[in-house]
Image (cartoon, grey):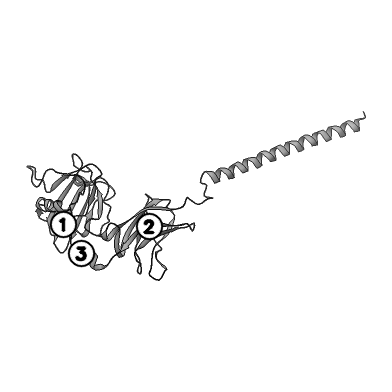
Amino acid sequence: MTGTSFDSVSTAAAVARASTAVAVATAVAVAAVGAGVAGAQTTGGGTAPPGDPAITDVLCVTKCIKPRKGVIGSKVRIVGTDLQQVRIVSLPKSDGRRAKDTSPYVKPSGAVLAYVKPGAITGRVRVADSYGQRKDSPIEFKIGTQAQLQRARQKYKFPVPGPHQYWDGLGAGRGHQGQDIGAACKSRVIVAHSGKVIERSGAGPEGAAGNYVMIFNKRDNRTHTYMHLFNPPAVALGDAVTTGQFLGKVGQTGRASGCHLHFELRAGRGWGQVLNPTPLLRAWDKYS
């Protein structure tokens, strides 16, 4: 074989080997890109919408006649799953359209807070998210009248509707300023009488009272205080709350021994003269 022929064969073999290497490298790169895309699609890389929103309950928060009945302007709390992207909350109107709140607030917990807008009538609450997905609540939210709301606000209820005991009352040999109501941890606490939230603890327990809230009723000129709640109160400063409205859960935050609600009654607005709440509590307890 001549030198020229040998060089030609060697060159051809080198070219073949180089071509093979390029093909293999290209295949590997394509496979890697494909795996990356698949990974982004399966691991929530932002390429796919969340699951369909689902509503499990709708509860009245402010201006409440009943737990699931309010008026125009009521704040409602919507709970369920996949509600993080909700952008519109609506109720039906009599003309077939929807009364929409286009600025609902999505809490870190995933619950949605919205307002009942003018024109709303009794019906199922609908949520719509940023992906165009919509879902109606399984039960209706009822719209009542201002007269019904006014009557609801004049009523009284015992603040711990579940099983409970009467623990230390006023004085108790230690300057105790209220009535302790013993109950299982996380038992519901409701508003005993309507009024306005004038003070509350912040994001966590504060001092001896722990998680607490004060509600003032202007007509009665009385302040009710609820202390040692398990979590921060479910109402905000300035809220107008209604008898029977959910307030929080029984706890033992602050200076407390055993789960109980410490309930105080004071004359006037705020930390005024201490009054004995026990006779009233026992009276409310009989019919609540």
For label 3, the SS is helix
Residue located 25% across and 55% down the image:
245
What is the crowding at mark 1: few (fewer than 14 residues within 10 Å), some, or many (at least 20)? many
In the rendered structure, find residue 223 and report the number of the disc placed on it: 1
Q: Secondary structure at mark 1?
A: strand
Instruction: Give the label on residue 284, or none.
Output: none
- Name the residue type under label 1: Thr
Q: From the viewer's side, name the closer residue of 232 and 97.
A: 97
Name the residue carrying label 2. 105
Residue 218 horizontal/vertical position (percent): 16, 63
Q: Please report whichever mark, 3 or 1, sits nearer to the chain's N-terminal start.
A: 3
Q: Is residue 141 left or right of residue 131?
A: left
Q: Amino acid at mark 3?
A: Arg
The Cα atoms of the two marked residues, 2 and 3, are separated by: 29 Å
Q: Are marks 3 and 1 in contact (CB under 8 Å)?
A: no
Residue 221, placed above or below residue 246: below
**In front here: 158 or 94?**
94
Residue furthest to the left in view is: 173
Give the vertical position of 264 relative to 10 (above or below).
below
**Residue 151, disc:** 3
Q: Earlier in the sequence, mark 2 or mark 3?
A: 2
Q: Sort mark 2 into few (<14), some (14-19) or many (20+) by Cα contacts within 10 Å.
A: some
Q: Position of residue 106 (x, y in %)?
A: 38, 55
